């Protein structure tokens, strides 16, 4: 799969994705703090299904109720359309899990989003 240009990546981040993904070193990263361990489990279960369907596997880091999802396409040595399609799936999953209890963590701050 073809690696996206920086301009294409920024277009996806600014126009297609709605959560605060961070672009860093050839990957996009979303850090989320869930309301409960049950929601963490549900998110990971749904991510595994998406991974199987898209044949694309993110790096995930879990610490109690905090989850970090990192996407990149190793074969392309950077970001491809598949990474952003997967990111959209992540956003849809998060929208469905806990509409009032998701906290997003960016590089500089943490903020609560209600009624996603």
Image (cartoon, rainbow, N blue to C red):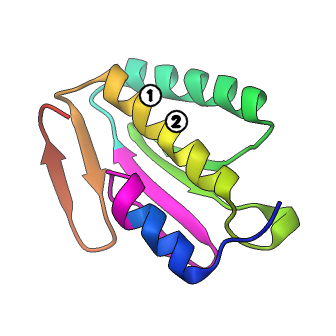
| Res 61 visible | no
Write the residue at 52% across / 80% down.
7
- Is 98 left or right of 37, judged from the image as shown? left
Q: In the rendered image, which quarter is residue 6 located in? A: bottom right
Nearer to us in this view, 67 or 99: 99
The region drawn magenta spans 14-32
* Above or below, 11 relative to 1: below
Write the residue at 64% across / 54% down.
83
Write the residue at 15% across / 43% down.
113
**Quarter containing the N terminus:** bottom right
Disc number at residue 93?
1
Pointers 2 and 1 in contact (CB under 8 A)?
yes
Nearer to us in this view, 10 or 58: 10
Residue 78's spot in the image, x, y percent?
Answer: 72, 72
Residue 20's spot in the image, x, y percent?
Answer: 33, 59
Q: CA distance from mark 2 to mark 1?
A: 6 Å
* Above or below, 38 relative to 55: above
- The kind of secondary structure element at disc 1 is helix
* Above or below, 83 relative to 27: above
- The kind of secondary structure element at disc 2 is helix
* Above or below, 68 relative to 8: above
Residue 19's spot in the image, x, y percent?
Answer: 33, 52
**Quarter containing the C terminus:** top left
| Label 1: how many Cα within 10 Å (few below 14, some 14–19, many 20+) | some
- Is 78 left or right of 34, judged from the image as shown? right
Disc number at residue 16?
none
Within the magenta stretch, is there residue 27? yes
- Is 67 left or right of 81, judged from the image as shown? left
Nearer to us in this view, 54 or 51: 54
Residue with the mark numbered 2: 89
């Amino acid at each position: 799969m073809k690696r996206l240009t920086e301009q294409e990546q920024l277009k996806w981040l600014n126009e297609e994705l709605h959560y605060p993904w961070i672009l860093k070193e050839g990957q996009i990263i979303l850090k989320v703090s869930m309301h409960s361990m049950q929601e963490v489990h549900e998110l990971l279960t749904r991510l595994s299904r998406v991974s199987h369907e898209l044949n694309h596997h993110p790096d995930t880091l879990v610490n109690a109720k905090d989850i970090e999802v990192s996407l990149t396409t190793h074969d392309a040595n950077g970001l491809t359309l598949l990474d952003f399609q997967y990111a959209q799936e992540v956003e849809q999953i998060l929208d469905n899990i806990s509409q009032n209890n998701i906290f997003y963590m960016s590089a500089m701050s943490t903020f609560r989003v209600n009624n996603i």
